[in-house]
Image: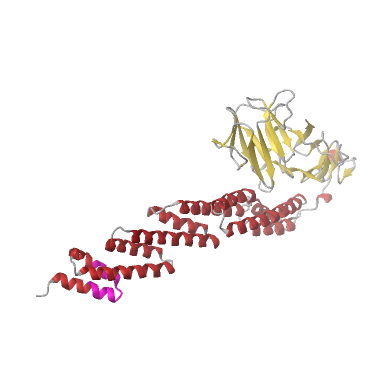
Amino acid sequence: MFQSWRWKIKQAEAACVAGRLDEAMRTLRQGDLRLFQPAQRVIDLLATAYRVRIETRLVATDFAGAWADLQCLAELIGPSAELQQERMRLVDAELDQALRLMEAGDACGAVAIIDGLERRKEFNDRARRIRDAARRLDAASQLQRTGRFAEAESQLRFAGNLLPETACIDRTIDNCHHKADACRRLNSQLHEAIADSAWSRVAVVADELLQVAPDYRLAQDARQRARAEAGGRPAMVNRPVPPAAQGMPVMIEQQGKLDGPQIPSRFRLWIDAVGGYLVCLADQVVLGQAIPGNKVDIPILGDLSRRHAIIRRQGEGYFIEPNHAVSVERQPVHEATLLSDGDEISLGSSVRLRFRKPHVLSATARLEFVSRHSTSPSADGILLMAESCVLGPRWQNHVVCRNWSADVILYRQDEKLYCRAMDSIQIDGQWTEGRGRIGENSRIAGADFALSLEVV
């Protein structure tokens, strides 16, 4: 009687020749047929067939199938240089596919591939760099959708340093620049339209902004309000002058006290029943110790160096540059570092500030003291004013004034300061219909608010 093991080896060979590799492998595993010498020829034949199929699966990007076949090949030929070479080829093929997905804009797909390699314990330095870069690309994509282009560019440049040979990152940075320029232009138009209550124009500009940044919250809010205001309100110039202004001249633009191009680089903003704020207009401000003779933009009463750190506005983003001990979110920083909304900044051993950038339509930022320190002269907070500063009852405003009925905007244009409101306002004793020039020590008042400027 023909021996059963010989018959099974014949079965395995027939399955292999017919291309049924997995069936042949299962047959060889039965009774440990691989220990019999006649089975060696079938093992060699099956190993060759698996090598061919691995190649076919790689071409089809069927990596799961390729890894399964590699496992079968490992059973057939055992640990060897050839097996290691096949494994490295498969890892490289997956990493190349991850790069192709990144090129196609699918950073999440690239991360998923490399996470799979890590689970297989096939994680190397190239895989780490590709995954980190893909995560940065994905983060940049999300930031761009919300209109935070400066932070997105920082993530992209980090990814570019990880993978300098990847051309898609440079293209993405260029695209980010174009979107940022468009967003800044449309932001300005949206501000103007909202201030003028031109709601049809607000709707058009908001739609254009959402084409650039689909998750831009304030553009969504502006569009929603524009739809609610369909039909519009009467133009401001047609609104009745408040009784307090009867008999007083109405001004379209209040000249105030600044007749030349000068604009104060710093001033204190006193808001009745709210508080006092130090407003800095420069793109770069120096933080340091408040001692006589030490001329810094933000003098702090605390154990600091004379010029402890610099905060620089670049586009829509803010970077902190340490001259002495500085930490951001409890991590020491030694070079220019991008700040994100909500970051806690530590200066020296005890001074702590919170960086806020609450209003997505404005690049203006706010610094709040977390520790028991203050500026000299004292202020409730510090405003790093870009083009505009929004005051009012909404939580996302630069200064929240809960008892006000509507927003008031301070903005600068052509090196001059202006104030804009929804209703008639009084600037230095003279009434204007919602917008006017303000000076270095102006007093501004409306129906339910009052504020004043004081140059420091």
Name the residue rendered at 78%, 34% in the picture: 452
Horizontal side, residue 5 vs residue 57: left or right: left
Instruction: Quadrant for residue 52, please give it.
Output: bottom left
Name the residue rendered at 74%, 29% in the picture: 295
Horizontal side, residue 3 vs residue 390: left or right: left
Horizontal side, residue 18 vs residue 184: left or right: left
Name the quadrant of the N terminus. bottom left
Q: Nearest the camera: 121 or 80?
A: 80
In the image, which residues are magenta? 12-27
Q: Main secondary structure of the magenta part?
A: helix
Q: Position of residue 249 (x, y in %)?
A: 90, 42
Q: Position of residue 262 (x, y in %)?
A: 84, 39
Q: Position of residue 309 (x, y in %)?
A: 65, 34
Residue 447 in view, yes or no: yes
User: Is residue 24 positioned above or below 398 on the image?
Assistant: below
Name the quadrant of the C terminus. top right
Name the residue rendered at 61%, 36% in the picture: 354
Name the residue rendered at 56%, 58% in the picture: 166
Q: Nearest the camera: 255 or 105?
A: 105
Q: How is the image coloured?
A: secondary structure
Residue 183 in magenta stretch = no
Residue 398 in view, yes or no: no
User: Is residue 63 positioned above or below 254 on the image?
Assistant: below
